[in-house]
Image (tube, rainbow, N blue to C red):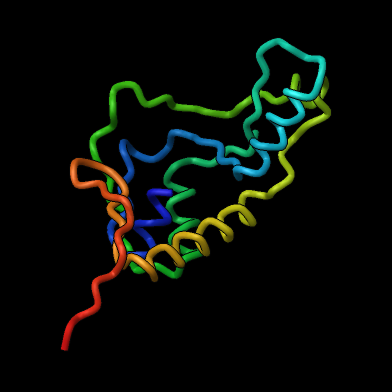
Amino acid sequence: SNFIIQSLQDKPLTIYGEGQQTRSFQYVSDLVNGLNALMNGNYDMPVNLGNPDEYTVKNFAEHIKEMTGSKSEITFLKATKDDPTQRKPDISTAKRELDWEPVVQVKEGLQKTIAYFSRVLEESGEIIPTGQDASKPKPKIEDEA
């Protein structure tokens, strides 16, 4: 959500490292459906309920910038020590044991998430997504004239 919030506010998109590390993204309804299948099934061992679609962080930031029509610049900060270089879940157990796999495509999930944060920003005026000054949305204060 940080890239979306930053993009919608035309703030710099911050990437830690060179952006070549990969991540996988999943829409919440897929996770809920996977948890439901796990709770209502007979399988009781560890299972990964992620989305195996993999993106570099830089590519994902560029994609979100394009989808939001943002004028944001992409900035690169020092990499964190414990940042994994690859995240691509193996969901073969979930497919086999739970007959589950994600159904919401990343683009569709992003469209829904962008629409949600657009509404939140319309109501609040600003969201600070991370760092010391991070804040939850607050109601806009209308100027008194």
| Residue 40 occupies quadrant | top right
Q: What's the residue at 28%, 32% (across, down)?
A: 79
| Residue 44 occupies quadrant | top right
Q: Position of residue 131 (x, y in %)?
A: 23, 41
Residue farthest to the top?
45
Q: How many marks?
A: 0
Q: What's the residue at 54%, 41% (across, down)?
A: 55
Q: Is residue 133 visible?
A: yes
Q: Position of residue 37 (x, y in %)?
A: 77, 28
Considering depth in this image, is 82 or 134 the residue closer to the camera? 134
Q: What's the residue at 44%, 42% (across, down)?
A: 57
Considering depth in this image, is 144 or 132 the residue closer to the camera? 144
Considering depth in this image, is 121 or 17 the residue closer to the camera? 121
Q: What's the residue at 62%, 31% (across, down)?
A: 50
Residue farthest to the bottom?
145
Considering depth in this image, is 132 or 93 the residue closer to the camera? 132
Q: Position of residue 123 (x, y in %)?
A: 38, 68
| For residue 34, above or below residue 145 | above
Residue farthest to the front?
144
Give the position of the C terminus as an image quadrant.
bottom left
In this image, 113 relative to 33: left or right? left
Q: Is residue 10 visible?
A: no
| For residue 43, above or below residue 106 | above
Q: Position of residue 63 (x, y in %)?
A: 50, 56
